[in-house]
Image (tube, rainbow, N blue to C red):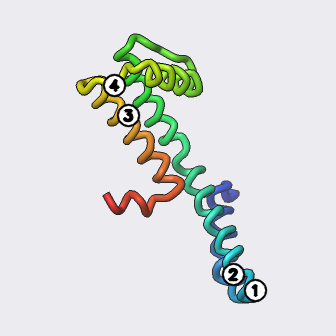
Amino acid sequence: MNQPDAQDLLVTARDTLLKHLLPALPAPLHYEARMVASAMQIASRELAQAAACADIERQAMAGLLALHGEVPATPEQARAVLARQIRQGAYDQAGEARASLLSALRAINRAQLGISNPKVLTHD
């Protein structure tokens, strides 16, 4: 017997909230119900896309930090190393390093927006 996974449960619960519960709620509670539905949708997308988003960040950071001979072990370390490099001016001059930084940050940001607010990506 196949059981629904967390993403399926969130989708079903959100659908029930919007189609059956929202119409039965008093109008002053509609905003809050829609906020809950939105949070459920974001959580569902995160379950579906979190691994891919993490891979995009890992690859982007690895390529970027390799330019300076850095190989952090964890995403947290990679972020800390990148922050230190930015503070030290490693990307201040126009050129390959700066272009790589902007490309990496765009890729990471787009992956994160695909989870939190994919509508923004349609305006590119």
Q: CA distance from mark 3 to mark 4?
A: 15 Å
Judged by depth in the image, the label closer to the viewer, 3 or 4, is 4
- Determine which of the numbered discs, if any, sits on residue 92 in the image: 4
> Badge 1 is on which residue?
25
Judged by depth in the image, the label closer to the viewer, 4 or 2, is 4
Determine the residue positioned at 67% across, 77% down. Answer: 31
Q: Is residue 104 left or right of residue 52?
A: left
Q: In the rendered image, which quarter contains the C terminus?
A: bottom left
Please state the horizontal and vertical placement of residue 43, each as a whole percent of the image. 62, 56
Please state the horizontal and vertical placement of residue 20, each as a whole percent of the image. 69, 84
- Determine which of the numbered discs, if any, sits on residue 30 in the image: 2
From the viewer's perspective, is residue 27 above or below residue 74?
below
Q: Describe the element under mark 2 as helix, strand or loop.
A: helix
The disc, 4 or 2, on the residue closer to the chain's N-terminal end is 2
Please state the horizontal and vertical placement of residue 24, each as a whole percent of the image. 74, 88
Which quarter of the picture shows residue 119? bottom left
The disc, 3 or 4, on the residue closer to the chain's N-terminal end is 4
The disc, 1 or 3, on the residue closer to the chain's N-terminal end is 1
